[in-house]
Amino acid sequence: MPPITPKLPDTDVRFKLGCSLAYQVKAPTTFIFNVEVAHLKSLAIKSEILTFAPDIERRVYATPDMKNRYIGLNVAPGPLSLEYNAEVELTVHRADPATVNETPVSELPLDILPFLLPSRFVSSDRLAAFAQAEFGHLPKGHRRVNDICTWINEHIAYQRGASDGETTAHETLLKRAGVCRDFAHLGTAFCRALGIPARFVSVYAYGLVPADFHAVFEAYLDGRWWLFDATRQAHLDGLVRIGVGRDAAEIAFCTPYGEMEPTNMQIRIDRADGGSEPTERTVDAISTEEPAPHAGAV
Amino acid sequence: MPPITPKLPDTDVRFKLGCSLAYQVKAPTTFIFNVEVAHLKSLAIKSEILTFAPDIERRVYATPDMKNRYIGLNVAPGPLSLEYNAEVELTVHRADPATVNETPVSELPLDILPFLLPSRFVSSDRLAAFAQAEFGHLPKGHRRVNDICTWINEHIAYQRGASDGETTAHETLLKRAGVCRDFAHLGTAFCRALGIPARFVSVYAYGLVPADFHAVFEAYLDGRWWLFDATRQAHLDGLVRIGVGRDAAEIAFCTPYGEMEPTNMQIRIDRADGGSEPTERTVDAISTEEPAPHAGAV
Amino acid sequence: MPPITPKLPDTDVRFKLGCSLAYQVKAPTTFIFNVEVAHLKSLAIKSEILTFAPDIERRVYATPDMKNRYIGLNVAPGPLSLEYNAEVELTVHRADPATVNETPVSELPLDILPFLLPSRFVSSDRLAAFAQAEFGHLPKGHRRVNDICTWINEHIAYQRGASDGETTAHETLLKRAGVCRDFAHLGTAFCRALGIPARFVSVYAYGLVPADFHAVFEAYLDGRWWLFDATRQAHLDGLVRIGVGRDAAEIAFCTPYGEMEPTNMQIRIDRADGGSEPTERTVDAISTEEPAPHAGAV
Amino acid sequence: MPPITPKLPDTDVRFKLGCSLAYQVKAPTTFIFNVEVAHLKSLAIKSEILTFAPDIERRVYATPDMKNRYIGLNVAPGPLSLEYNAEVELTVHRADPATVNETPVSELPLDILPFLLPSRFVSSDRLAAFAQAEFGHLPKGHRRVNDICTWINEHIAYQRGASDGETTAHETLLKRAGVCRDFAHLGTAFCRALGIPARFVSVYAYGLVPADFHAVFEAYLDGRWWLFDATRQAHLDGLVRIGVGRDAAEIAFCTPYGEMEPTNMQIRIDRADGGSEPTERTVDAISTEEPAPHAGAV
């Protein structure tokens, strides 16, 4: 059984969020959207509406293990628009980072182990020596993953256009530039290379300027998943999850099979609880998913 | 609803199979083994025994979606050996390949779609143009995936030592050489690049000489998963599944975290039903997993 | 001594050619230009004028082995334009391709051997198995290199934007698309992989539409360098050499060190001998460099 | 004209050196050897003998620009051995590193510029951002190249078997391990990426334990080539040049075209001047090639 992490009181915050997307479809196209907030206990959906114009029949699917929600549509040529609005209450689990330890591989639940494996954009096997040399000697725990984020932030320039949809973690390391997707892939890769399970997370990010879909990552420490943002651009306690996956391939907000062009994209998130002050750039360790009873635990 | 495939009568065949593995552990090591046959309706386990020496406490885990069975052990320095023996009855679903069609992406169940995405060793995104140019114009269906296997068989040399644990599908294509793992990754990659869901499968392979863990792949056609072996070395109707995954990373028969050396490895599979003649290199389309009701189906 | 190739009569043709280039220099920049025609016996320069505006002091350099001509300028911020015009008479050496044989490595002059080595964009070592499998069994000689060009032409799409300045031969093979530079790199790579010395050539190309700097390659056969164009876009007997090198890195028409933006680029080549009919897409083997006495020849 | 570097007195040291190589030739093979010391003014050859058994006809070739000496042999199946012994006097040019400055690209001789270009194993273009981020801000001059060597020495592990004949500089950076060849490629790549001409050098290295062919690199500073060894394993003032080139491809000690196996390899170098004390791990800037009058100099 994992050690108990002394934790700070949970905090609740209410957000209004959503997105408006539009496409010009050129040839019959199957769209898979992943824009709805995830089905999590810590994320109470107070209201939610998703509309398409035209109003096409949809298929829905939620991954049982990941709680991601996908919507599929088969769209004929012409315009397509999507409008999503939700009000949610996010329960943020907080802890003193100094108390959040790494879990040795020997104690990891078996269903967590896949998050140690390399994936398409998270080339942790190719970064094994690099990660070991840079971070192998650092004090373990939440602070080590935070040190990794600091290192990435200092060594990789945030630069639009520096990467594309095929860019892999080790390439970002060489190019020394990327966007949030690349920062998250590299952080994920370093963690996995060090034996720390890690996964890619897409979010509505409170405090991100300009507003956009954001990518961060989670590391599995002391029995639960903790959030990290190597870009340092958003508030860790203002991240509302859309999806989690091995890497960006699994949780693109829009995966089109066909021919189309995006024509509009707007993302929004605001506090809904009347509070005037924003959440801050917290130094707490932050988690938004409840630890689950694991198959395979001793 | 997917079209109904006129099928041939199912056939049952009984196998005795197993493996003996041994390791010299140098430093405390967590082993994850995936050597037991999968939990499938089509695969009746008549008897099964798995022993370790020394007899260490084990953790077990089966992936809910994949039916793979994993065993985890934390092993102290010294020798470790594993002995697995099972008797199983495999029900082979057969169809005339000419009747097995591709399913358009617009009709794929949403839970099948992840098998269109690139993964660590299946760089289908980087092979998109190549796959389209070589196979895009071919008649669709089971025959197209079979044509892909023929192409791989003619263009890639089966050669031990030509690849290693980091070899990715597009590298195999350039090197023109590999082992069963590489053949399966390349077949999987070409399929995904063409919009055909595909996954990597590890098996006990009847008829493989010399006996070894074997890797093949499955493509999703007409509502179920069909087996393909681009090496043409084993009998398609003699493949007993151990695991399926996005690629080899997920279903290694042994994933060690620590320090150890393999000292022995023997794999075996024989017919157990007294029949003297072997199964043959069938030209039937072969499937060994029942179609499941899918979430997300229209 | 290499065998004598029965040859067809040489032909002479006179061209007017040149280019107009312009740049906006943002910060002090050192430009290296390689736009003047090469210093070859077979290329008689009847008149030639190169001007810069502003008229900056220039440094000139011709590679002794390659006959390439480079001009260096240190340019202050502001506009820079280059105007080059020349009238040349090209003597084209022709032979029946069936009579042009490959030279075994054992008979190659030692100063030709470097053109068997891989270079930055000509990853012939990584393409060794591929080249051997596709072309190793073909009848040797000029026809084999021509077969390579045909293969490239049939398998690689000519597509602007499919590559960039870092694209390497094996990547073009995977992407199945590129521009003249990529076609030439791939042809060069396949040749070197087969033991045929090959090099990258930049030219003014008569018959190319639209007019542009063009890249082709040369293979060393039967004691001299023969021209090949895998794009099949220009007339082999209308190629006026600018430079030759291991690959594109060595003979870029403009290599800038500093900060600048190109603002204009025009290339031109026309027949100057009053002849109305164009040269044709010849099937002759074409060479435009005299064989030289080689150091290291037996 | 480059600024004059105040220099320390030259020192002369006499070495006896050589190598014994043997091969079993399986099929007719053309060997190109590059084991003789280079033809340099600073390297007086007092005596020299190179023998082959069997005593096969040889072809010889020296690159005019590089002073490398190549020997070609066509060898029939059977054993082949090479014995090389020489006594040389090396004149070492020394300077205070603090006085050796970088030469701006605008002042570089045009024939030096090719050493700014990427080559097969020196992927300086792919390392541009990395080099700029790590070393762009450092004080320029000999000290900066020395800082690069220190960085490589601290970040890359010297490890046999970590690389192979296809390993490229950026891969060494990711693998964090390599041998002298890889250290030299990486040093060369960082320099070129920063606008410092650099080239790969093979040497007999006094003080290297165990004795072996060694690879170092040279950077062009203040009008001449200066030696650097990122492995810090040999004495900079005890390096006797065999060859220089863009990278290892050009100056392999043995390039075989055919089929053979190496059966023996011994390298030796000792002081021949009766002096008892060794040369030391000097902190002087060291150069062993005279500056040449350059074509293209202003």
Image (tube, coloured by chain):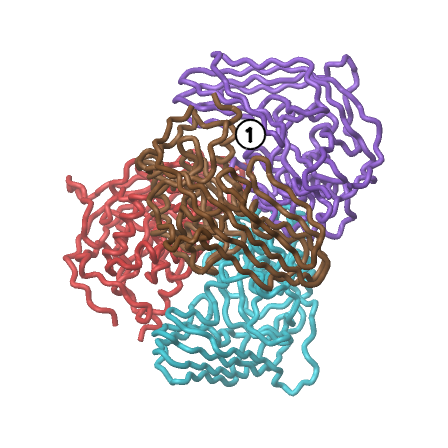
Chain colours: A cyan, B red, C brown, D purple
Of B286 and A126, nearer the camera is A126
User: In the picture, which quadrant includes the N terminus of chain A?
Assistant: bottom right
Residue C226: x and y, percent?
42, 39
**Which residue in the rendered view is the most extreme toward the front?**
C274
Along the horizontal axis of the image, is C224 left or right of B134? Answer: right
Along the horizontal axis of the image, is A81 left or right of B297? Answer: right
| Subunit that carries the residue with mark 1 | D
Residue C223: x and y, percent?
43, 30
Along the horizontal axis of the image, is C162 left or right of C144? Answer: right
Residue D8: quadrant of the picture = top right
Q: Residue at x 51, y 20 (%)?
A: D59
Q: Residues within 10 Å of mark 1 (few under 14, many from 20)?
A: some
Q: Mark yes or no: residue A115 visible.
A: no
* In this view, B273 is above or below C260: above
Of B56 and A129, nearer the camera is A129
**Which residue in the rendered view is the most extreme toward the bottom?**
A274
Of B168 and D199, nearer the camera is D199
Residue type beneath disc 1: Ala
* In this view, A8 is above or below C278: below
* In this view, D118 is above or below C109: below
Residue B297: x and y, percent?
32, 73
Residue A209: quadrant of the picture = bottom right
Residue D288: quadrant of the picture = top right
- Residue tagged by mark 1? D252
Along the horizontal axis of the image, is A293 left or right of B69? Answer: right
Q: Residue at x 39, y 58 (%)?
A: B128
Residue D249: x and y, percent?
54, 34
Q: Secondary structure at mark 1?
A: loop
Q: Residue at x 55, y 78 (%)?
A: A267
* In this view, B92 is above or below B297: above
Of A131 and C74, nearer the camera is C74
